[in-house]
Amino acid sequence: MPSAALASTLPKRDQDGFWLDGLAGEGHGTTALTELRKQQLVLLGRGRRGTADVVVDGKKCRVNLELPREQAQRRQTRASSTISWYAIGAMSEPSPFCAEVLKAGARGYAAVAVEKLFAQFPELDRRFAPNASSKWRDNLLARIQYLAASVDTGHHVGFVQHVAWEKIALMARGGDEACRDLECSLRVLRETLAAELPVNASAAALQCLDLTLERFHAMPTDVSMELDTSTPAGTLGAKYLLAVLEGDRRAACELILDAAKGQSAITGTLTVTEICERVLGPVQIELGRMWRLNQISIAEEHFATETTQTAISMLYLHLAQRPRHGKVALCACVESNAHDVGVRMVAAALEDSGWRAICLGQNVPIDDLARAAADFQVDLIALSGSLITHVPLIGAAIARLREAAPNAKIMVGGLAFAGSSLDQQLGADASASSIADVVAVANRLVGLQTP
Ligand code: B12
């Protein structure tokens, strides 16, 4: 389904030159219009032009799949006038229409792009055997989804960052050749979308790809270590990581618990919040770096993350025994986000300072989130997103939560928000980048003093 944000802006009369025969009149709600729009997008995504007959709400309707030329040109001019913004990494104008077209036609575009890619670089078939084309189809499909999320939010830099992440991972696995494959596939994707996307939907996607390609060669092929072993907390993190990589969960957790109990020879006493912020958080990021550089396997990353989750759970018993002030926070990752270490740390930090935190963890469907917010009568909702693809869903969740829990304040955070103003764009009340800031910001939002 199109996002709630898009659904709420759907025009009754078509502003893009589509005519909504039979549905634009009285008695048909947003759902029917949304469904009609979806069918238009699917057809456009498949490259259909002219008109088509579709059935919506039991009624046969004719939709126009051609746009008036002047409107399309005006949109393209407006979009291209914002190019200079991308150059400095600022936000662009969100293009939810482009995003919907991309999502609706993603499989088709990926298939066409793979055909072009293999026609231009026939050796890929041999190098990626067996099932070379299906591997590339999956790869391009995922890339189109990241692209859709970036144009949806106007945060084109999100796509650039994703490709930069991929470039390092590929460099570590296949060297220069793998990086060249990535660049070629992006060029072919651009070619494909330039030819296949409806003219009024292409500008944002092409600009995002151009920005990425422009920066491709400047993207690093290596990344430096996250843990700062010149500090006691960094040294503790390094010892913890070593114990984990040796497969010794108990030794790893004991190191962390010793710090919480004031028995660590390395750090002395650390609060739960300090352990999250200065020890376990950097360890997790270091794990990501090691995986990216092909130094550890997925199994090792999973075991380490699992151990970190255990450590966070054990720390729960060592929270400061502050009296509760009565405010309640709901902490969660929206659906499709599997990264819940950060949000668990947010919940721990809030609990540590007197909040009652209800942490729902990863991948929470929007309706259930809304129900929980209403049932627990929460004062604050903290939503976490790690990838750019999580951001549109957080936008949809905020819209839904404003109805379900109108008095609750909403905070967003996580890797996907780093260095952007996406929080304001989505209509959140605040954001915070570090655990230390989370409590101060949360307190301010609900009118509490931070000690
Ligand atoms: C562990 C991990 C996983 C685990 C997660 C398990 C779990 N239960 O959490 C698994 C294996 C599931 C996973 C999957 C994927 N991952 Co992953 N993952 C990581 C890794 C290594 C660590 C994440 C973590 O624990 N970070 C530590 C926490 C503490 O950091 P944080 O979440 O940013 O939270 C901090 C702040 O952001 C803030 N915060 C967080 N939430 C909130 C909320 C609020 C309200 C506020 C105020 C603040 C706040 O507070 C925290 C403390 O400072 C990162 C590497 C990295 N650099 O982060 C990659 C990473 C995030 N993953 C990545 C990717 C690509 C993926 C996958 C797409 C991989 C794939 N091809 O399948 C999937 C996507 C899954 C999905 N649908 O979400 C990339 C993202 C790159 C990009 N820019 O697009 C990264 C960066 C990988 C890397 N090696 O560098 N991943």
Image: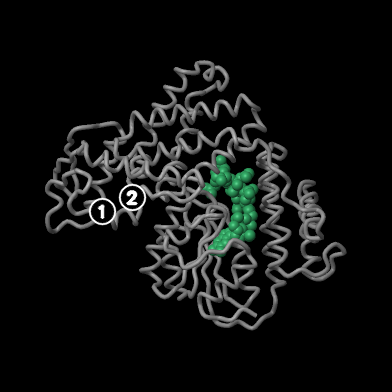
Local secondary structure at mark 2: loop
Q: Closer to the camera, 350 or 132?
A: 350
Identify which residue, 20 or 76, lies in the foreground.
76
Which residue was labeled with disc 1?
10
Quadrant of residue 188 in the image?
top left
Q: Position of residue 54 (x, y in %)?
A: 19, 40
Rendering coords of residue 394 (x, y %): 45, 57
In depth, the one of 159 and 332 nearer the eye is 159
Vertical comparison of 22 with 194: above or below: below
The quarter holding residue 308 reads bottom right
Q: Is residue 222 visible?
A: yes
Helix, strand or loop at label 1? It is: loop
Residue kind at label 1, given as amino acid type: Leu
Residue 137: percent from left, percent from top: 46, 30
Left or right, residue 21 beside residue 172:
left
Badge nearest the viewer, 2 or 1: 1
Image quarter hosting the C terminus:
bottom right
Q: Residue at x 63, y 36 (%)?
A: 169
Query: How many C-alpha atoms fall within 10 Å of the one at disc 1: few (<14), some, or many (≥20)?
Result: some
Residue at 51%, 34% (x, y): give it: 214
The colour scheme used to paint the residues is: one colour
Q: Along the polypeptide, which appears first: circle 2 or circle 1?
A: 2
**Residue 260 placement, left or right of 108:** right
Q: Residue at x 51, y 47 (%)?
A: 89
Task: Place residue 372 in its image quadrant.
Answer: bottom left
Residue under pointer 2 = 2
Dot 2 and dot 1 residues touching (CB under 8 Å): yes
From the viewer's perspective, is residue 357 above or below residue 168?
A: below
Distance Cα–Cα, label 2 vs label 1? 10 Å
Direction right: furthest residue: 265
For badge 2, the amino acid type reads Pro
